[in-house]
Image (spheres, rainbow, N blue to C red):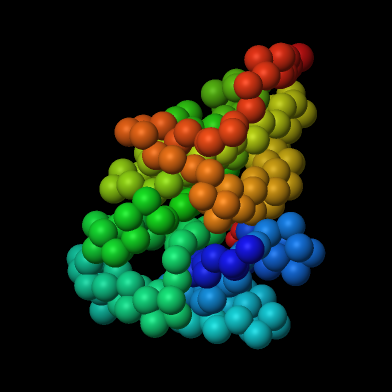
């Protein structure tokens, strides 16, 4: 199978990027990371990319305050230069504009550490605990113009324990993030995902209604 070319946008430590790279190297994901771009020059993610001989490009947002479209045009140029077919946001701490979305229609994914549409935005693991949710998890979705509002591709669910802190819940969710992001990319690469309005339909998707989780 042809390897789909990914452009991964990051801002920080890059554990999701690392999981994607590892899953490719382990043969679990038919993809190639064509380029990693960071808005932060000192992001550890760039170091991770370099260790795997992946082009690692810092694109500073300094001087682009209030000019998000112009900044995204820079991203589009880099992504196109590397023949990227699917853009993966992995801890990229900027809102994407229509400039990027129009260049990659339904071809931008994001991972979010909560079960959307609950808890969009930042510090969502803490928010889930404080709200008293009994489950949380993570969501991979296509990106639209809103904040964490695009069509949902896949979710993983984890229990929220009474003893949880933000750190323990984040770690439990992150473990699942590292699995489901690659799975979403693989499903996309196989051409099995179809976006119908807000819904992402998977051809040949599962039909069992037996799965359930109860906590406590
Ligand atoms: C992850 O929790 C992801 O869901 C969120 O940002 C965090 C990035 O972590 N969007 P990492 O940089 O991939 O380790």
Can you give x and y, in whole percent of width and height, for residue 48 in the image? 66, 76
Residue 73 visible somewhere in the drawing: yes
Would residue 87 be found to the left or right of residue 3 on screen? left
Q: Residue at x 52, y 69 (%)?
A: 5
Residue 206, compared with residue 145, is above or below; it is: above
Quadrant containing the C terminus is top right
Q: Residue at x 22, y 72 (%)?
A: 70
Q: Residue at x 66, y 15 (%)?
A: 209
The one of 99 and 194 positioned closer to us in this rendering:
194
The one of 60 and 207 positioned closer to us in this rendering:
207
Would residue 182 be found to the left or right of residue 120 on screen? right
Residue 89, compared with residue 25, is above or below; it is: above
Residue 212 visible somewhere in the drawing: no
Can you give x and y, in whole percent of width and height, for residue 10 in the image? 51, 66
Would residue 107 be found to the left or right of residue 18 on screen? left
Q: How many marks?
A: 0
Would residue 91 be found to the left or right of residue 196 on screen? right
Residue 17 lies in what quarter of the image? bottom right
Can you give x and y, in whole percent of width and height, for residue 157 in the image? 66, 31
Residue 24 lies in what quarter of the image? bottom right
Q: Residue at x 63, y 21 (%)?
A: 207
Residue 81 lies in what quarter of the image? bottom left
Residue 98, compared with residue 154, is above or below; it is: below
The one of 12 and 34 positioned closer to us in this rendering:
34
Quadrant containing the N terminus is bottom right
Q: Quadrant of ligand 1?
A: bottom right
Can you give x and y, in whole percent of width and height, for residue 126 in the image? 58, 37
């Amino acid at each position: 199978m042809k390897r789909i070319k990914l452009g991964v946008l990051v801002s920080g430590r890059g554990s999701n990027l690392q999981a994607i790279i590892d899953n490719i190297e382990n043969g679990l994901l038919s993809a190639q990371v064509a380029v990693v771009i960071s808005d932060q020059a000192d992001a550890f993610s760039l170091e991770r990319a370099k260790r795997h001989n992946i082009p690692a490009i810092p694109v500073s947002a300094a001087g682009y305050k209030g000019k998000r479209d112009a900044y995204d045009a820079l991203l589009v140029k880099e992504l196109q230069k590397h023949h990227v077919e699917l853009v993966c946001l992995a801890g990229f701490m900027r809102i994407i504009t229509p400039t990027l979305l129009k260049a990659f229609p339904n071809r931008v994914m994001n991972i979010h550490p909560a079960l959307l549409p609950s808890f969009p935005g930042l510090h969502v693991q803490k928010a889930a605990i404080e709200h008293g949710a009994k489950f949380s998890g993570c969501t991979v979705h296509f990106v639209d113009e809103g904040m964490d509002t695009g069509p949902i591709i896949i979710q993983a669910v984890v229990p929220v324990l009474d003893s949880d802190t933000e750190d323990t819940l984040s770690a439990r969710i992150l473990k699942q993030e590292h699995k489901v992001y690659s799975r979403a990319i693989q499903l996309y690469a196989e051409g099995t995902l179809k976006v119908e309005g807000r819904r992402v339909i998977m051809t040949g998707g599962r039909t069992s209604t037996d799965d359930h989780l109860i906590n406590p």
